[in-house]
Image (tube, helix red, strand yellow):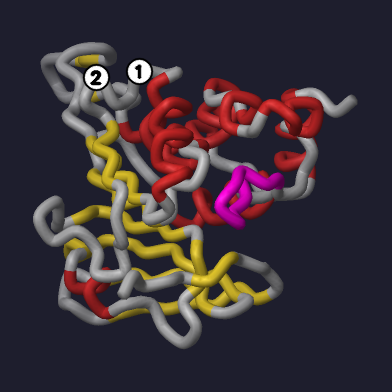
Amino acid sequence: MTTKNDLIKELIDFGYLKTPRIVEAFRAIDRVDFVRDEYKDEAYENYPLPIGGGQTISQPLTVAFMLELLSPKPGEKILDIGAGSGWQSCLLAYIASKPRTYADKTRTVAENPRESACVVAVERIKELCEFAKENIEKYKFISNGIVKFYCEDATAGLPAEGPFDKIIAAAAASRDIPEEWKNQLKPGGKIVAPVGGSIWFFEKTKEGEWKEQEFPGFAFVPLIKDK
């Protein structure tokens, strides 16, 4: 049976996991805590698994690839659209809440004060909301204020919580990502989201221009807007 270390080694060896803080998150946030009981023995296999409601916990390869593109950092406010099982939300929360090290001529602070951090996780399928929240709370990220969880449609983003440093989505728009997501992104921010069968990277420059890059060859559930 594949172990967590086997999975992480595979992702590193094939170049999907690169950044030390993201590798550390994969080690600390255990995928087995986010799968249904009947799939526990397959938690460390590199493929998606059903979680109910016609949805899946994403393939580890895909999650690693998207997080590396997003490049989350401590103290950032991140919108996670399509929380599903809560696994990616927890990976983001671990990274965003990790203390930064400050260094100047007079001091180095490695532990406190910790920067404020917030992952805003959104899931529209009601039967998955409780599943995701229970999973996230295994790491106390909701009770300690690092993750805010919403059970609703996020195709229009969450303007009351924005603007965001980063936005990531787990469901594919058919033609283009919603314009509202772009409007709720800070200058210098990044969006990683699927469109059709591709992962797209968007970066908003400080001048308000957009840089875009496509990475084809992926499969996602469709992004659905509630009526």
Residue type (three-letter) at the residue carrying disc 1:
Lys
Question: In which quarter of the view is residue 142 placed?
Answer: top left
Q: Residue at x 71, y 33 (%)?
A: 8
Identity of the residue furthest to the bottom in this view: 175
In the rendered view, does 45 fall on the left or right side of 33?
A: right
In the rendered view, does 99 fall on the left or right side of 2?
A: left
Magenta highlight on residue 53: yes
**Quarter of the image that includes the N terminus:** top right
- Residue 152, relative to residue 148: is it above or below? below
Circle 2/circle 1 CB separation < 8 Å? yes
In the rendered view, does 42 fall on the left or right side of 48?
A: right
Cα–Cα span, label 2 and label 1: 6 Å
Residue type (three-letter) at the residue carrying disc 2:
Asn
* Mark carried by residue 144: 2
Question: In which quarter of the view is residue 30 placed?
Answer: top right
Question: In x, y percent, where is residue 152?
Answer: 29, 55
Q: Residue at x 25, y 42 (%)?
A: 76
In the rendered view, does 167 fall on the left or right side of 52?
A: left
Question: In x, y percent, where is residue 214?
Answer: 55, 77
Judging by the rendered image, the residue that carries numbered circle 1 is 140
> Which portion, as a residue range, is magenta?
49-57
Magenta highlight on residue 173: no
Question: In x, y percent, where is residue 120?
Answer: 27, 44
